[in-house]
Image (spheres, rainbow, N blue to C red):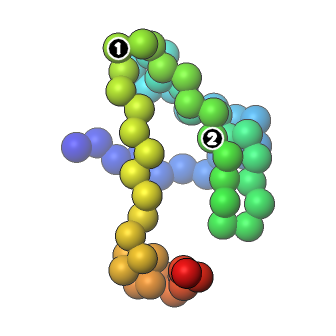
Amino acid sequence: MSSLKLDVRVGESVSFESGRITVTLMDKSGRLARLDIKANEDVKIEHIKAKASSLARNGITVAR
């Protein structure tokens, strides 16, 4: 599995698979970021939410 960690500013994009997938940072506020993800129709896009246990390890609490 490939991994990439980078800092981007609002309005900047990252492209994958020779442009088949483009991710743009639309807005950033605190710990939340709004991403615009554009991909070819044959690309499946999934939202994987973090589990409370993994957030707790990073000092983040989840209000319920």
| Residue at image coords 76%, 47% | 27
Q: Which residue is mark 2?
A: 35
Residue 38 x, y percent position in the rendering: 55, 23
Residue 45 x, y percent position in the rendering: 41, 32
Split into 4 quadrants, where in the image is the C terminus?
A: bottom right
- Say if residue 9 shows up in the picture: yes
Q: Judging from the image, what secondary structure is the residue with disc 1 in?
A: loop
Question: In the picture provided, is 17 more to the left or to the right than 1?
Answer: right
Question: In the picture provided, is 14 more to the left or to the right than 49?
Answer: right
- Crowding near pointer 2: few (<14 within 10 Å), some, many (20+)? some
- Crowding near pointer 1: few (<14 within 10 Å), some, many (20+)? few
Identified by mark 1, the residue type is: Asp
| Residue at image coords 35%, 14% | 42
Q: How much space separates mark 2 and mark 1, taking CA atoms?
A: 20 Å
Q: In which quarter of the view is residue 16 placed?
A: top left
Residue 42 against residue 5 in the figure, above or below: above
Q: In which quarter of the view is residue 57 placed?
A: bottom left
Looking at the rendered structure, which numbered label has been put on residue 63? none
Q: Which residue is mark 1?
A: 42
- Asked if the residues shown at circle 2 and circle 1 are in contact, with their CB atoms under 8 angstroms apart, the answer is no
- Say if residue 18 shows up in the picture: no
Q: In the depicted view, which residue is nearer to us: 4 or 24?
A: 24
